[in-house]
Image (cartoon, rainbow, N blue to C red):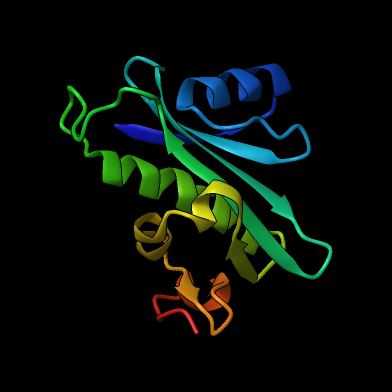
Amino acid sequence: MIEAKTIQDKDYQAEACRLCGIEFDPDALAYAAVDSDTGGLLAVSQFKFGSDGFGELTDVAAVTGLGEKTDTGYSRRDILFLAGRAAMNFLDICGFHKARAAGSLARDESLAKLLGFNPDSNGVWSCDLAYLFTGEHCQ
């Protein structure tokens, strides 16, 4: 099984980011997607609370070298989805009901769409988390 776990140690966050090929942001919060049987890291997501009331999901990346399927049969897509949605859910619970894709996620259209983001007329990818987590489409 895959689990999303908060990363509360900045050294571990830095290592997870290195293993996933993304830049560590010490000001960001993070989740790790891990294999619950082995504890092995599969992916990481980094996010921030924006000063404008938006949460920012800046990175969602799998461990470098992870294929399209793990040995246990989970797809890369599912792993990235779990890592990203864990961060988005936390933002929503904390009162940030709107989020935007930033950083490396803003440049990955396929992953941004998978997570529920839509581009506005200025090309900014955003999502209304209040709608997303009630089963409705993003506005």
* Left or right: 114, with 107 as reference point: left
Q: Which quadrant of the figure has residue 112?
A: bottom left
Q: Residue at x 61, y 66 (%)?
A: 99
* Left or right: 51, with 112 as reference point: right
Q: In this picture, is 41 found above or below 108?
A: above
Residue 105 in picture, x, y percent from top left: 51, 52
Q: Residue at x 29, y 31 (%)?
A: 1
Q: Which quadrant of the figure has residue 51?
A: bottom right
* Left or right: 67, with 2 as reference point: left
In front: 97, or 117?
117
* Left or right: 18, with 112 as reference point: right
Q: Residue at x 18, y 32 (%)?
A: 69
Number of marks present in the image shown: 0
In front: 79, or 3?
79
Q: In this picture, is 123 found above or below 81?
A: below
Q: In this picture, is 25 found above or below 71?
A: below
Residue 71 in picture, x, y percent from top left: 17, 22
Q: In this picture, is 138 found above or below 41?
A: below
Q: Which quadrant of the figure has residue 46?
A: top right
Residue 20 in picture, x, y percent from top left: 47, 27
Residue 7 in picture, x, y percent from top left: 62, 30
Q: Residue at x 62, y 38 (%)?
A: 30
